[in-house]
Amino acid sequence: MRLVLQLVARLLLIVALCLGAATIWATFDAYRSVDRATATSAQRVAQALQGLYWHELLLRSSRMREHLMPVPEWRTLETMKLISPGVCVEFQPATAFEKPLCGQSQGIGRVPPRWFASIVPTFLGSHAEVVRPVSPRAAAAGTVVATPDQAAAISLAWEYILNVIDVALLMAAAIALLASLAIAHTLAPARAIVLALQRMARGQYRTKLPRFRSMELGMIGGAVDALGSRLEESVEQRAALTRRLIEIRDDERRALARELHDEFGQNLSAILAFANTIETASTKDRDHGIAQDARMISQATHHLMASLRDALKRLRNPLPEELGLEASLVNLVDSWRSQSATQPTIQLDLKGDLTDISGPAATTAYRVAQECLTNALRHGAAREISLHVERCAGEDDALLIRVEDDGGGDAARVARSAGFGLTGIRERVAAAGGSLSILPASRGLSVAATIPLAA
């Protein structure tokens, strides 16, 4: 799941929890607001009746205080205005058949559902009546009792909750939308970081990232840039080390070629001369058995000398250093063609200007072609082999070498092979900054190498 979606989902969960908490708080506050309205109504009516009481007492001083009960003319429109909706007020001691004076309760609030009307009183309890004395200094003046209407209280609470929930839902939707957009905008640079890492995986280590406003993403971007620089330095150092190892190996090959030529070559020549001498002397003495043995020694010596010459060709200085790349490739193909008439057909296709290609690039190209032709001829049953060498000039100056054969073979198995030949050309191509691929062809294998020529 994408990180943006995860964060948005968590945000929505938090908003839902906050909305639930706000609903519970609104329910409690709306329900208890009725108690506050009841207390306020009782207090206001008591203060109004206190004024009436003392006014009548001063104007009619001849009357006894008990004759002022109840306070005259207290059930007026002015008193009604002091009573909150859904609250009933009565004066005690009340006269016979006197009914409480109630605030307007018709059409107040909204009709709540049955589950709300039954659950709220169960959890929050019922409303208590509020008693206030008319005059704290005159206990005989009576008291005011305010009683809330239970049904009106629940209706008012339900309407209050719906209003709060409507506002809360709008705010929650707005917060969720704006926060989601903010999260998406904040995490947008993560895509640039992922693309940079993907380019690094393909070998493009210099992937400079833009500066991010977020400190955390900026730290990640800086770490990615530093990692790319270190990887590029490591690759350059490894390529330099590989080139040095190849140079050392070539020096060893040349030294070994000299040793083989000087030591084995001379000794084989001496053995061949001794065998010819023995064969000549045995022929004169008519000792045919010794002459036959001498001829066998001569044949074995010729075979060893031929093998030695073939090994020296592979070990000595590569031909590109002497003839150039194009001439050395032509010479390589001609040498394989001339070895036997039963060899498969070798097609050489050269494209582009190869005259100025020299140095390590020419040596690497020659070694790749040499090794691929050797493998196709010795390890396959190919009847036709094609060697294609092309120079792609332009901004990306590179040399393309492709060897295809029709001898079958498993490309995946060959690619996994750890033979010295393939390992050697992989090292050479990597040291030159190129790439090597082994893929199936129409009827065999295709080995392709790209060697950059740019300085």
Image (cartoon, rainbow, N blue to C red):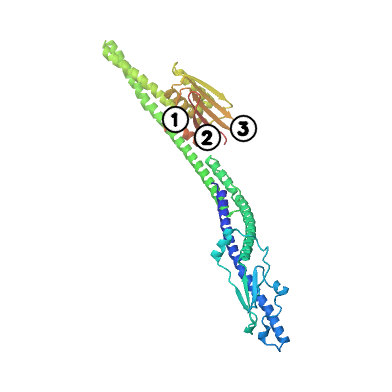
Residue 234 in the image: x percent, y percent?
50, 43
Tell me which corner region of the image, top left, top right, bottom left or bottom right, holds residue 113: bottom right
How busy is the neighbourhood of tag 2: few (under 14 within 10 Å), some, or many (20 plus)? some
Q: Which residue is mark 2?
A: 434
Q: Which residue is mark 1?
A: 414
How much space separates mark 1 and mark 2, taking CA atoms?
A: 19 Å
Local secondary structure at mark 1: helix
Residue 344 in the image: x percent, y percent?
46, 19
**Badge 2 amino acid:** Gly
How much space separates mark 2 and mark 3, taking CA atoms?
A: 17 Å
**What residue do we see at 38% from left, 27% from top?**
260
Tell me if residue 165 comes above or below residue 231 in the rendering: below
Can residue 272 be seen from the camera position used here?
A: no
Tell me which corner region of the image, top left, top right, bottom left or bottom right, holds residue 168: bottom right
**Badge 3 amino acid:** Gly
Q: Which residue is mark 3?
A: 394
Contact? badges 3 and 1 (CB < 8 Å):
no
